[in-house]
């Protein structure tokens, strides 16, 4: 009985932690000049703060609900999709990135 209770508690903890992650997709392509590009699409009902990093440059931006970002490109054809680093999280967790009220 106690074993089943512990197992149920563990399942509950792990299932809610999975739900807490933002859902976004990342697409890669090469443009006409053979430069690698990346785009992030928000697939949640909340705004996200994201960044795309390549070659030491980090570009932060906001993504609204169910909205794709613009295409961010590398600086050299030698870069490929594995050189990009992407990250997104819920905007309400990072108040420093909230748009300023006028």
Image: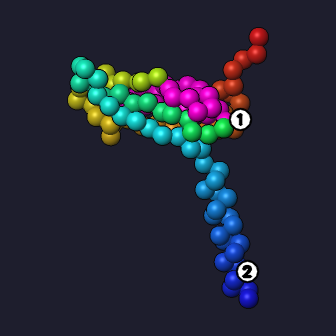
Residue 92, image quadrant: top right
| Drawn side of residue 54 relative to residue 33, left or right | right
In the picture of the structure, the residue carrying the numbered disc 2 is 5
Q: Toward which corner of the image does residue 84 lie, by quadrant?
A: top left
Judged from the image, the secondary structure of the residue bearing numbered disc 2 is helix
Percent x, y of residue 90:
64, 38
The quarter of the image holding the C terminus is: top right
44 or 55, which lies in front? 44
Q: Residue at x 40, y 36 (%)?
A: 27
Left-right relation of 62 to 25: right
Q: Does residue 62 appear anywhere in the picture?
A: yes
- Report the front residue among 98 and 22: 22
Residue 2 horizontal/vertical position (percent): 73, 86
Q: Determine the residue positioned at 55% across, 32% down.
A: 50
Q: Earlier in the sequence, mark 1 or mark 2?
A: 2
Circle 2 packing at 10 Å, graded few (<14), some (14-19), many (20+), is few
Is residue 50 within the magenta segment? yes
Q: Is residue 38 above or below residue 89?
A: above
Q: Which residue is mark 1?
A: 92
The residue range painted magenta reads 46-69
In the image, farthest residue toward the top: 102
Task: Judge whether 48 appears above or below 8 on screen.
Answer: above
């Amino acid at each position: 009985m106690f074993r089943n209770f512990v197992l149920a508690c563990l399942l509950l903890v792990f299932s809610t932690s999975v739900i807490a992650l933002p859902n976004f997709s990342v697409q890669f392509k090469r443009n006409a000049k053979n430069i690698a590009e990346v785009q992030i699409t928000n697939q949640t009902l909340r705004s996200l703060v994201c960044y795309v990093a390549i070659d030491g440059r980090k570009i932060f931006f906001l993504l609204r609900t169910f909205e794709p970002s613009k295409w961010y490109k590398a600086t050299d054809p030698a870069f490929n999709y594995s050189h990009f680093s992407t990250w997104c999280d819920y905007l309400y967790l990072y108040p420093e990135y909230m748009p300023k009220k006028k």
